Image (cartoon, rainbow, N blue to C red):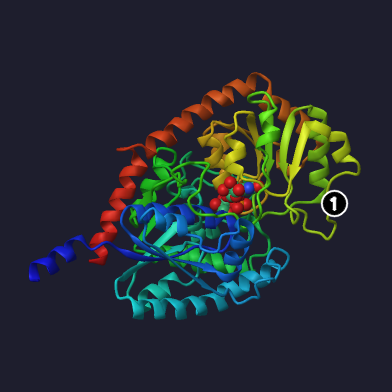
Amino acid sequence: ANQTGMADQITKNPHAIFIPLPLQGHLIPSVHLAVKLASKGFTITFINTESVHHSITNSSSSSNLFEEACKSGLDIRYATVSDGLPVEFDRSLNHDQFMECLFHVFSAHVDKLVGSLVKDDPSIGCLIADSFCVWPLMISKKYKLVNISFWTEPALVLNLYHHLDLLKKNGHYDPLDKFDDAIDYIPGVGSGSIKPTDLMSYLQATNTNTILHRIIHKALFQNTKSADIIICNTIQELEPYTISTLNQTQPFYAIGPIFPNDFTKELVSTSLWCELDCTRWLDNKPPGSVLYVSFGSYAHTSKHVLEEIACGLLQSEVSFVWVLRPDLVSSTDTNALPVGFEDQVKDQGLIVPWCNQKAVISHQSVGGFLTHCGWNSILESIWCGVPMICLPLLTDQFTNRKLVVDDWKIGINLCEKNLVDREEVTKKVKELMMQEKSNELRTEVKKVKRTLQDALATGGSSHRNLDHFVSQVILKTN
Ligand code: UDX
């Protein structure tokens, strides 16, 4: 019995509680990471908010999210917790209230739930939480769990958040009053320096006394710095200098891109909204001829910007699929498009409220992506060898744009200083889809795509880093 006991101890696989941030762009890589870890032998208890659970089950008509994954032999358990607001509450329209609840009420609910899970199952040894959560340090200490922080954005962005004190000392944060001089004193910035306008939008804000700034200070400046391990949805070869700098202070593993095994077929539903199928429409278009346009799941823009984009697209005569989320324009005006636009577009464009982006972008007719530069969208675009036109709107998207356009040269800017103008839209769309620049971008994006493929292949950096991460967790939890 002793021997069996010892053998059990040596091979004991970790049991992790996994809590994503309840936002679409954070949920997607979290679900795929949970599945990846379960396929490496982890037991995962995945916790969604009731609101996210409600949205996913509504859009997929599946009540048991991980059923397919469990059928294929993975040990993924599932629980939900309230974020403190009624399920039907409009979180997009009342964003600050939602954030306040995530800060206070959600933390208290998570604390209670983790307490009861740990009490019932002593095999639980670690907590994996999105780095934007404010409570992981407190909860992991309280329940003696290994604290693993999951960073869903580029390493460069986390590295900048970790240096808020330096930015402040140099007049580049709180308040940002030096717009012209490059920031060249932060260790680990791949290109040596970064322009103030390429900082994350929260750092460029004039009012830093907001709930989001409190979250950033608590979660990113304090909490993640105390995590036992950070795992990140990036690729070692794309951000080598930044990653080695982060690694000097903490174990930091680049394990991206975190996609489902079959890029277009997900074992677990992750979409918060119903997906419109664009395949038939795309099937009728020549290879590489369609521009995909999407501004992600979260950011808002103005009716004016959408009008300029709409007219610019029309003038370009390039075919397009455009995801127009109903809440994209943050006003009560639900029809954000110019009057008569849909009639004029005819078969040139397909406008949908939400789609399966991976299916669209991997379709052979798609040859370009006009994107807000969300990190998932960038990785998906690279994976499909599709170059980008960039229009960052919020948060990390400004910094991600720098990586795409200035550092990796796989995209172009839509406009200078984010002043969107229809003539410029037409010009850039043609440049991306048809002209000489298009070939240069396609050559470069293929090279970066190869970097991603190599990283995930057996023996590649992300493959090795994931294995190393798993063995570290086994060590720490046994
Ligand atoms: C924000 C941040 O900007 C991003 O960098 C961070 O990692 C997550 O939160 P978000 O607006 O959600 O981004 O954009 P993005 O990161 O691109 O994620 C959107 C996800 O939704 C992608 O995985 C995309 O495939 C999916 N999507 C988008 C759809 O499935 N259908 C759509 O119609 C649009």
Q: Name the foreground residue: 414 vs 332.
A: 332
Left or right: residue 337 compared with residue 39: right
State which quarter of the image contains the N terminus: bottom left
| Picture coordinates of residue 113, whole percent (x, y) | 45, 78
| Picture coordinates of residue 366, whole percent (x, y) | 63, 31
Q: Quadrant of residue 476?
A: bottom left
Q: Quadrant of residue 420?
A: top right
Crowding at label 1, few (<14), some or many (≥20) Cα neighbours within 10 Å? few
Residue at image mark 1: 335
Which amino acid does the dot numbered 1 rest on?
Asn
Residue 399 seen in render:
no
Residue 124 seen in render:
yes
Left or right: residue 340 compared with residue 310: right
Q: Name the foreground residue: 33 vs 79.
A: 79
Residue drawn at the location 51% of the way across and 76% of the way down: 107
* Label 1, ligand 1: CB separation under 8 Å: no
Residue situated furthest top in the rendering: 436
Left or right: residue 363 compared with residue 142: right
State which quarter of the image contains the C terminus: bottom left
117 is higher (above) or lower (below) than 153 = below
Residue drawn at the location 48% of the way across and 32% of the way down: 449
| Picture coordinates of residue 303, whole percent (x, y) | 82, 50
Helix, strand, or loop for circle 1? Answer: loop
Q: Name the foreground residue: 432 vs 362.
A: 362
Report the number of discs: 1
Q: Name the foreground residue: 364 vs 395.
A: 364
Left or right: residue 316 compared with residue 215: right
| Picture coordinates of residue 5, whole percent (x, y) | 14, 69
Residue drawn at the location 49% of the way across and 66% of the way down: 219
Residue situated furthest right in the rendering: 339
